């Protein structure tokens, strides 16, 4: 797990190595163990390493294979690299390291761009072909690892964070009105290639971008998720057994592929608790970590009562972290600084503070993100299934944070326009291949919504502390199996029915049968006291007024009733406005001139 950055010039000039150095400075926290760079005329490539596999110098990057004429900067983990190494050795390749980076180089030498179809893992990489003077940018199937880029007629720059591109300079900081519509209606999900800034784009998941030395580009998709029943029908018990076997294999692989200890972020929910149970079934007992916050009258701030059940059952070495509200507010700007894009999820600051503590003990953790989307764990899926009408009419009332009409009244005239989010959702749901509406919704969630909500949040907040977060529920082989399972088995029992059947007997019943929970930070949902003052100051600031994004009547309405305006997903609308403005002030307004 690492940070990458680079530049390719199209105008015959040498790569700007000073800009590369500024970008590397912005991604240094992602990889604090080693910094390396490579230049080849118009190309400059940088890498900040977090040493997880092959801790020796043989794992340093950028990694150069002069015989094959390839240079690689890679961020991620290839979980099947031992099998690929074995196959490539039989094909005559030699290896100087024991990590996965060199496997990518040899695989590219053998199979070219098709090699990516062999990889099982999370990854982003930039690969330079010296002879053809061609650059390839590649992102994993579910976008677990990020890659941003900016370009003009003279060059393209790319990096693991948008802050790196802003630090390099020359980025158009104006607001993309289409992305803004997504930001406020789709729970801060801005699907690739857009970001909220016109000057920064991101590589879509499951895609590779080829860039020739003259600036010619070719974007191609290398994988697509489908949701169809298999030809041979399986009984419910057969599905449970198939799923259990795949889960045990996947979590064990995610635990074993590391040369450092791997822990588990234990929230007290079904998903993270099941990770511990699956690992225990495989004969592994991971170290576990939990976090909690102060209660509010309306909501508890921790789920320790459930995580404690798991710790007691398995006897894990456990660290429990409690964060007072004054620390949440004090540290909140730091978390915003770590956001490559504005994120409204309450648990962003939770993951940031948790990662700070966990990184003092381990370098790698497994996390339960993805299970709700893959196995229909959220409350809105049954409601969508029961609804009538078009795909959009069944989806929007249970997911959109705001209807289009509210958005148009929230923003000032320059940012008004058509219903961009309604069009996007309709088009993407129609394009997905699935047997039923819910099949297509889950596939849309897994390939689009989750990428720019919980997965991006976990990556940014953990990597801010040099902590690698692995998400075994998004192993592509596991997801492909899960998408074949009939939706009724997932929606059953209040959601994640089949996953609960897998878990029964593996983890305490009290965790399985508990009400659905979230990673709670109540102070960012029920806004009052110092948190209200904080948000009022942001939204009444000179910078916010001069930006001219929000209609003041809408802002004043939310400020006068701060704990009365919630989204359909139970988020604070006031926090949504304040967070975006704070992100601009800390990440964009302070950019180099």
Image (cartoon, helix red, strand yellow):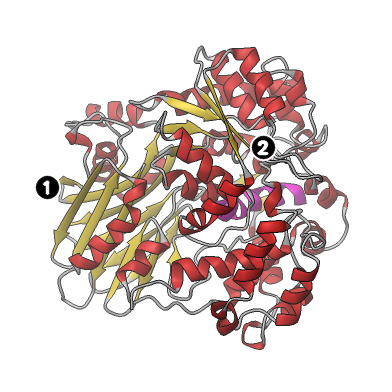
Q: Residue 470, percent across and down?
A: 48, 36
- Is label 2 in contact with label 1 (beta carbons under 8 Å)? no
For the point 56% across and 84% down, the residue is 546
Give the residue at mark 2.
484
As measured in the structure, the alpha-carbon distance from the residue carrying label 2 to the one carrying label 1 is 44 Å
Residue 76 image-quadrant placement: top left
Q: Is residue 347 visible?
A: yes
Magenta stretch: dominant SS?
Answer: helix
Chain part drawn in magenta = 436-453
The stretch drawn in magenta includes residue 215? no
Lateral position of residue 506 relative to residue 262, left or right? right
| In the foreground, 26 or 5 | 26
Q: Is residue 449 magenta?
A: yes
- Residue 532's quadrant in the figure? bottom right
Q: Nearer the viewer, mark 2 or mark 1?
A: 1
What mark, if any, has residue 161 been given in the picture?
A: none
Helix, strand or loop status at disc 1: loop
**Can you give x and y, in whole percent of width and height, for residue 82 in the image?**
33, 27
Q: Tag 2, which secondary structure?
A: loop
The quadrant holding residue 54 is top left
- Residue 66 is tagged as 1
Image location (x, y in percent) of residue 432: 64, 55
Residue drawn 63% across the image and 46% down it? 325
Task: Answer above or below: position of 258 versus 155.
Answer: above
Q: Is residue 244 left or right of residue 359?
A: right
State the quadrant of the C terminus: bottom left
């Amino acid at each position: 797990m690492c940070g990458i950055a680079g530049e390719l010039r199209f105008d015959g000039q040498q790569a700007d190595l000073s800009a590369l150095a500024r970008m590397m400075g912005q991604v240094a926290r992602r990889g604090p163990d080693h910094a390396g760079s490579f230049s080849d005329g118009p190309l400059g490539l940088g890498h900040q390493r977090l040493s997880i596999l092959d801790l020796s110098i043989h794992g340093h990057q950028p990694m150069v294979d002069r015989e094959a004429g390839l240079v690689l900067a890679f961020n991620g983990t290839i979980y099947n690299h031992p099998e690929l190494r074995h196959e490539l050795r039989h094909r005559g390749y030699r290896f100087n390291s024991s990590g996965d980076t060199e496997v990518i180089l040899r695989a590219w030498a053998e199979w070219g761009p098709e090699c990516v179809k062999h990889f099982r893992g999370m990854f982003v990489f930039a690969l330079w072909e010296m002879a053809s003077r061609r650059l390839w940018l590649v992102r994993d199937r579910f976008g677990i690892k990020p890659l941003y880029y900016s370009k003009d007629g003279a060059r393209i720059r790319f990096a693991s964070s948008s802050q790196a591109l802003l630090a390099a300079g020359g980025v158009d900081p104006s607001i993309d009105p289409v992305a803004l519509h997504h930001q406020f209606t789709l729970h801060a999900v801005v699907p690739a290639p857009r970001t909220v800034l016109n000057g920064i784009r991101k590589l879509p998941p499951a895609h590779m971008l080829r860039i020739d030395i003259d600036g010619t580009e070719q974007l191609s998709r290398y994988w697509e998720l489908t949701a169809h029943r298999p030809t041979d029908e399986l009984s419910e018990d057969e599905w449970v057994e198939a799923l259990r076997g795949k889960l045990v294999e996947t979590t064990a692989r995610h635990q074993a592929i590391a040369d450092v200890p791997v822990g588990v972020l234990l929230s007290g929910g079904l998903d993270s608790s099941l990770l511990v149970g699956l690992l225990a079934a495989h004969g592994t007992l991971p170290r576990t970590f939990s976090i909690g916050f102060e209660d509010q009258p309306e909501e508890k701030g921790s789920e320790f009562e459930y995580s404690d059940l798991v710790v007691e059952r398995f006897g894990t070495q456990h660290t429990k972290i409690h964060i007072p509200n004054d620390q949440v507010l004090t540290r909140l700007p730091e978390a915003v600084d770590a956001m490559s894009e504005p994120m409204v999820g309450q648990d962003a600051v939770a993951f940031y503070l948790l990662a700070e503590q966990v990184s003092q003990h381990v370098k790698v953790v497994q996390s339960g993100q993805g299970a709700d989307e893959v196995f229909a764990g959220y409350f809105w899926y049954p409601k969508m299934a029961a609804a009538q009408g078009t795909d959009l009419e069944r989806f929007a009332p249970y997911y959109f944070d705001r209807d289009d009409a509210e958005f148009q009244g929230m923003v000032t005239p320059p940012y008004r326009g058509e219903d961009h989010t309604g069009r996007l959702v309709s088009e993407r749901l129609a394009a997905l291949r699935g047997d039923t509406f819910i099949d297509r919704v889950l596939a849309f969630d897994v390939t689009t919504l989750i990428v720019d909500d919980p997965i991006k949040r976990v990556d940014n907040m953990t990597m801010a502390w040099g902590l690698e977060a692995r998400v075994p529920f998004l192993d592509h082989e596991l997801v492909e199996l899960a998408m074949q399972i009939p939706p009724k088995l997932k929606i059953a029992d209040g959601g994640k029915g089949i996953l609960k059947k897998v878990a029964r007997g593996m983890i305490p019943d009290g965790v399985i049968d508990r009400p659905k929970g979230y990673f709670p930070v109540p102070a960012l949902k029920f806004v009052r006291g110092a948190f209200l003052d904080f948000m009022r100051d942001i939204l009444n600031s000179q910078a916010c007024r001069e930006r001219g994004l929000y209609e003041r009547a809408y802002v004043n309405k939310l400020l006068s009733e701060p704990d009365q305006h919630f989204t359909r997903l139970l988020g604070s609308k006031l926090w949504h406005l304040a967070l975006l403005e704070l992100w601009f002030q800390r990440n964009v307004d302070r950019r180099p001139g």
